[in-house]
Image (spheres, rainbow, N blue to C red):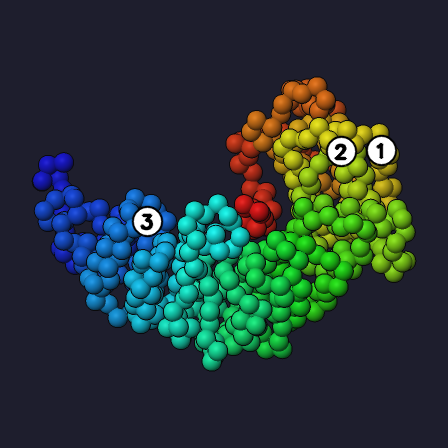
Amino acid sequence: MEKSDDKISELPEAVLHHILSLMPMKSATRTSILSRRWRDHWKYFSSYTKTLDFGEEFASVQTDEEFTTTVDLYIQQHKGNKMETFRLFFEPGNRYRSDTEKWIEFATMSGVTELDLNFRHYNEYYIGFPEASVPCKPFNLPHCLFNCDSLIHLNLALCDFNCPLNFNGLQALKTLHLRRVHLTSEMLESVVSNCLLLEELNLRECFSLDYIKVSGPNLRLKILIVVARGSPKIEISAPNLQSFHYCGALFYGHSFANFSQLVDVILYSRGYQHKKPEHDYIQILKELAHVKVLTVCNEPLKQIAISAKEKYHTWEELPITFDNLQELQLLLTSTSDKSLSDLYTFFANCFFPSLEKLFIQVPASESLFDFRLRNIAVEEPSNCIFHNLKSIKITGFKGNKNEMKLVKFLLKKAIVLEALILVVQKDSVVQWEFTQIPPLMFVHDQLLLLPKTSSDARILLCKQSDDDNNLWPTHTKCYFWLTRNF
């Protein structure tokens, strides 16, 4: 570009500095190579910026030594007295611990409001992953962090949450995310009881937690997310809780009766098998029957089917009526005869008078074992009618025999249905003889022939890449975040 056409460089320095302040840190630094005039403008950015983002992208192109030198340079240049966001993605090891403590102290002394610290993979050894080659102690958070009253959002990953004995809480803290962080049950209880403004608590794979207690009459907590690979004892009494997302084992004795303000719930326990039928899911679902949005895996369906068949329940336990439920998402692992039978039993014993949206996720491919579970009696529930169901979306659709049965059933029972969307995932339709998966063109023709109780119902068959429909479940992002690498 000729100099006469470079209108941006001709702007006053104050304007250029303002433009740089609105750019990501990495992009602002790169402007130094544009021309001689731009060479030192980034230093102004680093001097007065309120955001220092040494995140994963920033760290990916540098060695540890280069990273520490760059971070030190930015901190030395910084002259502002207020820091809003400080993000760090770094593996201190044993060599750079003092540097890392110094950076955190700088952030806390600058009145940081959002602190995001991810100490990367070296702690995998510490939390039980033997593939880490060099044993290393987890990074202990400096005590200055626990005295930072400006903190509103705190996100920690792969470190040791060693709060001091005289910890009085983070007075401004509203959100706390802990991923693979070592903390004891006593530490968690201290955080919950002392951080009086806490509204969101996210505990993901904190293996040392064998007892999760979140209770107190003055709790402001609105969102609670727990991902647990073990089976911790759980005690929750949060009168203001609105969202509860749980991924892990649920056993008899887990009570959620004190959730009067609860609006949306995820219960995901795939991979946890009970040796004998438990009544926990029936009791839990009864306690959660007032929610408006619910996502469950197939475990509750299985247990309700077993209880209904073997009559483990009393007349007071089933059926369950979800009076307020407007959206239901079912995460199925199979469409075998057994799975379809469990689903029908679930619909026979759970009523949804206000349900408007139904999302069903079926596996993109079926195992040979699933298709051997055939010749099991599958009887449609005669007492099931969806009076207000307007939208249905099935993802992972392949068009096999049982999926077509399910579609036919839903078209019959949803009397005011407006749209049925069937999404075929990329490369999901494989022509294996034992799967009985027909070609998509044949499936499309068969769908057009299915009877519909609602004359207004439209059926749309599309690939995942072509799914631009605005119908998405509330828990789409939450579900994938919960189950990622799980």
Where residue 2 appears, as percent x and y from the top left, is 10, 36
Q: Which mark is residue 450?
A: none
Which residue is found at the position 57% from the left and 66% from the top? 222
Front in this rendered view, residue 235 or 453: 235
Secondary element at image label 2: loop
| Badge number at residue 59 | 3
Mark 1 and mark 2 in contact? Answer it, CB < 8 Å.
yes
Q: Which mark is residue 336?
A: 2
Residues under labels 1 and 2: Cα distance? Answer: 9 Å
Q: Residues within 10 Å of mark 3 (few under 14, many from 20)?
A: some
Q: Nearer the viewer, mark 1 or mark 3?
A: 3
Q: Is residue 34 left or right of residue 198?
A: left
Q: Nearer the viewer, residue 114 or 280?
A: 280
Say whether residue 215 is left or right of residue 251: left
Q: CA distance from mark 2 to mark 3?
A: 46 Å
Residue holding disc 1: 376
Distance, label 1 to label 3, CA atoms, is 55 Å
The residue type indicated by label 1 comes to Ile
Q: Would residue 300 be found to the left or right of residue 128 on screen?
A: right
Kindly state the secondary structure of the residue where label 1 is placed. loop
Q: Quadrant of the N terminus?
A: top left
Label located before the other in sequence (1 or 2): 2
